[in-house]
Amino acid sequence: MSQNNNKKNNDSLSFYLYNAAKLIIYVKNGISLKKVFSKILDKNNISEKAKGAIKDITYYTIRHLRLVEILLNKLIKKPIKISILKGLLFCSLALLIKTENRNIKNENKFKNYYKIYTIVYQSVNVVQFDSKIAYAKNMINAILREFLRKKGEIFKSKMYNIHESYWNYPIWWINQVKITYPNFFQWKNILDVGHKKPPLTLRINQRKTTLISYNKLLKKSGLETTIIGPLAIKLHTPISISKIPKFFNGFCSIQDAAAQLAAPLLDIRSGMYVLDACSAPGGKTCHLLEIADIKLISVDNNLSRLNMISENLKRLNLKATLILSDISKINLKKLYIDINKKTNNRFRFYKNKYFDRILADLPCTGSGVVRRNPDIPWLRRKNDIKKLSKYSCKILNNLWKMLKPGGKLLFVTCSLWFEESEEQAIIFSKNHKDSIRLNSPGQLLPTVNKKQDYDGFFYSLFQKRKE
């Protein structure tokens, strides 16, 4: 195949479908999209246009995964054993049901990115990319055309009206939301918002500009914006970072509006010693450093994610000490030994110094950020809530030993589950009689309206009593 033909094929819908199908299968096998995007997409001859299209098809399919699973089972006579073929049919069916809103039952609102005949034709053409499914050319065509013939009756049937296919989450996830938030409007909104495309929200760097000045710069660049927080600006149309004015000059960072609440809550002042635990990818780390001249140690147990913090610090011209470690196990003495090793004795004055402030961005199921990570419900299991809560409890107890009397610790999760948020805070208060629980936002539910647009987060702020 010539280079030109190869490039042409790589910008075809069949190529997008093939790669999206591979990504969907990874998710079905329990691997997150964040881990495999680079593996699939960062290859030669895949254009930025193709990457964008592949991601779009992948996300859309995952947001309708339970529905297309049920559809496929209804349309086939016997189970499909080849994973890539199953993934392809998931993606193709998802494109065929693509609408302007989630009310799929109203067929007058069907609107696809591609013409119906194009989807069917290009889905059949996917066989050119994988010899394992070459035999299935006629099968693919027959299944998709069968769906088109029967879609009217399918969407009027009981199959569509069951919770799983309508809401497109695993049944345990739907039940967990309804149990945690029994109010109809709350649980319905949570499930609905989880399927919406997230906004591109910027946090302006107050060391370099002001909210008003930077918003004017965005508008001057032809971008529609809405101010949704003290430092938060939402772009009405998401764009690549290369097109965000002065992004690489450090004028702003990408961060959800609710996540931007963390750093100001800690009430930091210049000269303080601050620990940022479970800190990757570094949005809150950098925000803390933008607020005041502090001595900050950032700890995470994932090297690749720790490197992301380093990249963000470099872009924003900020400095922190980065440590690769499991913060649930390390003690203050070991932490400082690691710092001195890493920095070649540059920071020996840290020795035995307790922290003035600690930010604990704890591991959780991520139930509050599903719209940004639609694979989360399919990767998690119900018992993950208990496991992660236990691990987070260990982290909090260990961090408390590193906080000086009078210091403050902010406990943060991007979870909606009571066990990972309020229950954790209640248990912590009972176990630590030297703690005072201060005012903080508590549980924030995912919210989308004209003035607000943010993910689900939980905040609880504690102060250690002075001796």
Image (tube, rainbow, N blue to C red):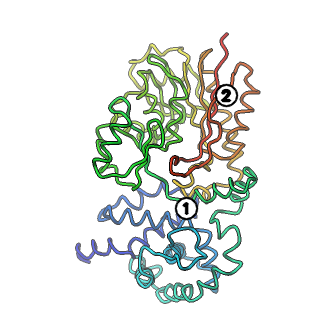
Up-down: is 220 above or below 20? above
Q: Residue 144 in the image: x percent, y percent?
A: 52, 84
Q: Which residue is mark 1?
A: 27
Q: Residue 459 in the image: x percent, y percent?
A: 61, 35
Res 243 visible:
yes
Q: Residue 149 in the image: x percent, y percent?
A: 56, 89
Q: Quadrant of the C terminus?
A: top right
Front-most of residues 444 and 228 = 228
**Marks 1,2: beta carbons within 8 A:** no
Q: Name the side, left or right, on which 134 lies relative to 459.
A: left
Q: Earlier in the sequence, mark 1 or mark 2?
A: 1
Quarter of the image for residue 328 reads: top right
Identify the amino acid type marked 1. Val
Quarter of the image for residue 340 reads: top left
Identify the amino acid type marked 2. Asn
- Residue 397's mark? 2
Rounded to the nearest angstrom, the CA distance separating label 1 from label 2 is 33 Å
At horizontal 65% and vertical 69% (from top left) the residue drawn is 166
Up-down: is 149 above or below 342? below
Q: Residue 284 in the image: x percent, y percent?
A: 48, 35
